[in-house]
Amino acid sequence: MKQNSDGFHIARERIAHEAEAFTGFLDLGQLGLTALPEEIYKLQHLQSLNLGSYYINDEYEWLSANSNISSNKIQFGLGQLSKLPKLNKLFLGKTDLAGLAWLNELKKLQILDCSITQISDLSPLAGLSALQELYCSNTPIRTLSPLAGLSALQKLHCYSTPISDLSPLAGLSALQVLNCSNTLISDLSSLAGLSLLQELHCIETQISDLSPLAGLSALQKLHCSNTLISDLSPLAGLSALQVLDCSSTPISDLSPLTGLSALQVLDCSNTPIMTLSPLAGLSALQKLDCRQAQISDLSPLTGLSALQVLDCSNTPIMTLSPLTGLSALQVLDCSNTSIMTLSPLAGLSALQKLDCRQAQISDLSPLTGLSALQVLDCSNTPIMTLSPLTGLSALQVLDCSNTSIMTLSPLAGLSALQKLDCRQTQISDLSPLTGLSALQVLDCSNTPIMTLSPLTGLSALQVLDCSSTPISDLSPLAGLSALQVLHCGDTPINDLRPLAGLSALKKLDCSNCSLTYFPKELLNRATLTELVLFETKIPGIPSEVLSQRKTANCLEFLRSHFADLEQGTVEVAEVKLMVLGNGQIGKTQICRNLRGEKFDDQIPSTHGILISSTPFPLRKHGKTVQLNIWDFGGQDIYHGTHALFMRTRAIFMLVWIQQESSAQEHVYDGMIFRDEPLGYWLNYIKYLSGSNNPVLIVQTQCDHPEDEARYLPGIPRELLETFRFCKPLLHYSSLKNRGREALNAALQDALIWLQEQQETNLIGIGRYRVKCQLEELRNADMAVPPENRQYRTLSQEYFRELCEESNGKISSPEHLLEYLHNTGTIFYRKGLFDDRIILDQSWALEAIYTVFHRKKCYKQLRQLRGRFTRSLLEILVWNNYSKDEQMLFLSMMQSCGICFIHHEGNEAEDSEDEYIAPDLLPDKDEISAELEEKWDSGFPSEGMEFEYELYHPGLLRSFISKIGRKAGLNALYWKNGVCLYEKNTGSRALIEQETIEDWQGKIRVQPRKDKQQLY
């Protein structure tokens, strides 16, 4: 393996430095070394060596390696370390190390870290009698047997390994610290005789009994959260115990802790405990976490004068009165409770942090004298004034979001305030913040604030969110040299020039703004690393180079776009025509007519999306535009794929027939498809694309005048008026080309209106040439029989050759690929399909469609509850495709949410990935018996309902797919729901979708713990 020259040079420099400094420690971690420099063996004084990603210093702190080139990959020659006679500490964590055979010569080794490696055998350690500390976590080690004779071992960290037996540790009488969390261990019996054990971590294991710990009188810290432990009785005599974490367990009784006078920290959160009475006499207790328990009374804490931190959030407590005399209390979290007053806190002068969000607090007056208060979260409460905070000069962080406050005046003198969140309030004036020179973070989004002028002098401000406000001018920010993050989306802002001088700006979000232009000096600023422009309009710039999702960073894409423009520009004289509607009603025939092709009743129904193009004359402007026609399959199975393409500037043609007065079904090619009423499709366009694109509503199959509808059935006027441009009643016959003049005129009007809304977009000449070449390849391929087509997919190499033929006019082929995908010219997802580019999307979608063919495999896959493997589909429907093509189809199905991996295969065991297609899942009544076993409907559980404007058939399918990728086998699926189990927290959830009137939908979520772990 090739040596990293930079890393090797740094290593030699550090060795030379250590030869003079003589500290005894050398850090060669993260240098990308494949061998050690020979000079290292001259350091005969060396005691500690780091070759990993982190190490322990003399103060016993874990520190990261001082370089970050890459992990070392030293597989040979490590045995030479025996030439360093005083070496006793060796750190190898997070490297490619796979074996330790060379270690047996390092007899003086006291500390070894080999965590996060591929080491699976500890046998070479058997003779290291001086070893005191071993860190082998996050490795495939299965047995600790080689450690049985290491009598000096004091610390062992073997968490996150497949270890299932601790018996080799039974004789290690010097052991003081053991971390065996997240392993397969279920029994602690082997620890019974380890009298020096002070600290034990057995989190997320199958341990259910603490009895072996009963005699461990030296035990000071025990972490047993997320286990099956239900009884703390064995701890009753452990008088040295200081820290106990038994959270997320079935423990319901704290009585065994009554006499543990040394206990300082207790976490019993997320348990069914109902009383804290056993804690009443624990005078040393400093920190208590009882959140998400069934505690309703804090009275037992009355005399705990040492208590400093208390978290009682998400409990049924209603009063804080028992806390009145706890003068040492510094941190209190009583959020999500029924507490109505903070009066008991009035005298707690040591209180520094208070979280009372989502409580019933309406008055902050009791906080008036709490001069030590630094952090206050009173968000989502009914408070109406901040006046009691006027004198709290130490206050640094305040969250008063989503409250009824209307003024920030009480904050005017709080000079220490660093962070303020007042979003979703009625605050309209930021003037009180004028003098707060320490303010670093401000969120005033979703408020009626109209000006940022009061922020002009806040030189320390680093983060500002003023999104969803009426603010239209960023000039007050021009001098804020420390500003790093700005969110100003969903505002009337159109000019970004005031930001041009902000040298520290790192992130900018101007989503859903209409900008006059984008300043190049801002775009090219070196400090800027993230730019979000989702649904932002910038004259001349195609939306396809901007953010395609709400959080997508488009900075490099926009930079590449401008770089390509410098090589020459071309007008984008093309517009998308998105043709939507139910299946089997004539959408494809309309598209054929628009392309100048004759009616053909032998043309099969569109499956997925069929993309074509045709020139269309704009008579008013005397020029021609290219109409890119997207013929969307109406089958509901493909609705999930529509969202990938519909958030775009386009004309939407909604096609319907007279019989569609209500939802129904139709049968085609052996499959039953659901039809949706016209109102559904209008809401569908509004939901996925907004109301700023032209909509043409075309009734088809109007062969005769009497076929024409005189009104749109079931469509309220208000719905039509939400669209800025809508031609609601067009009639057309593909068979007779009847109504073509009116259709052409409507298209003319829509195209002209669309162009008037935004300037003509420009792209680089190189991009234009590559795009034209791809379209020519696709069109030529479509003109020959399917068996003779050569360009269904393209390799990265071929695509780069096309880019190179542009003679340097393409700055980034990768960014051009994304642009072409966003325009619909190709389908590409980085990392999918072996990075191949799909040029013929209809070919891939046709193959996917066959999976749902009722005659070919629908019945078989339904019987298998929607489960299948690649080889099964090959037998049933994909026998004419290669294995690579089949994997491509499966990748595309996953990316569109049509299926997900239910169970990952194992190549070594010759097993395949098993997939589930949500549309092939059984109905709920077919799995009712199994559901009863997993979910007791009579058992109490809290629930939440989420209503949404449009019932989208692909919504829950996509949701189930996302859950399925993570839940895998730990879930029961049916067509409109899922019941899942999360093993780490022992939680279950039932998620179902149902439809309500007016094409609206509802998703119901019911989470809960198992019976023994309800809370």
Image (cartoon, grey):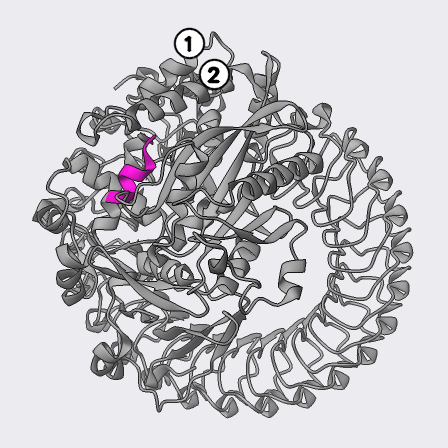
Answer few, some or many: residues within 10 Å of disc 2's Cα (few below 14, many 20 plus, some between 14 and 19). Answer: some
* Mark 2 to mark 1 CA distance (whole Å): 9 Å
Q: Earlier in the sequence, mark 2 or mark 1?
A: 2
In the rendered view of the protein, which quadrant contains the C terminus?
bottom left
840 magenta-colored: yes
| Residue numbers of the magenta segment | 838-846
Q: Pointer 1: residues within 10 angstroms few (<14), some, or many (20+)?
A: few
Q: Residue at x 55, y 63 (%)?
A: 712
Q: Amino acid at mark 2?
A: Arg
Mark 2, residue position:
769
Q: In screen coordinates, is 766 left or right of 461?
A: left
Amino acid beneath label 1: Glu
Q: Which mark is residue 964?
A: none
Which residue is found at the position 65% from the left and 28% from the top?
Answer: 760
Tell me what residue is drawn at x 34 percent, y 26 percent.
Answer: 778
* Pair 2/1: label in front: 2
Q: What secondary structure is the stretch in magenta mostly built from?
A: helix
Residue 959 magenta:
no
Work out whether residue 231 can be spotted.
no
Query: Residue 65 or 578: which is nearer the viewer?
Result: 578
Residue 805 is tagged as 1
> Which of the 4 image quadrants contains residue 233?
bottom left
Q: Are marks 2 and 1 in contact (CB under 8 Å)?
A: yes
Q: Secondary structure at mark 2?
A: helix
Residue 885, x across and y down, in percent? 20, 36
- Left/right placement of residue 768 relative to residue 250 reads right
Residue 282 image position (x, y, % from top left): 53, 84
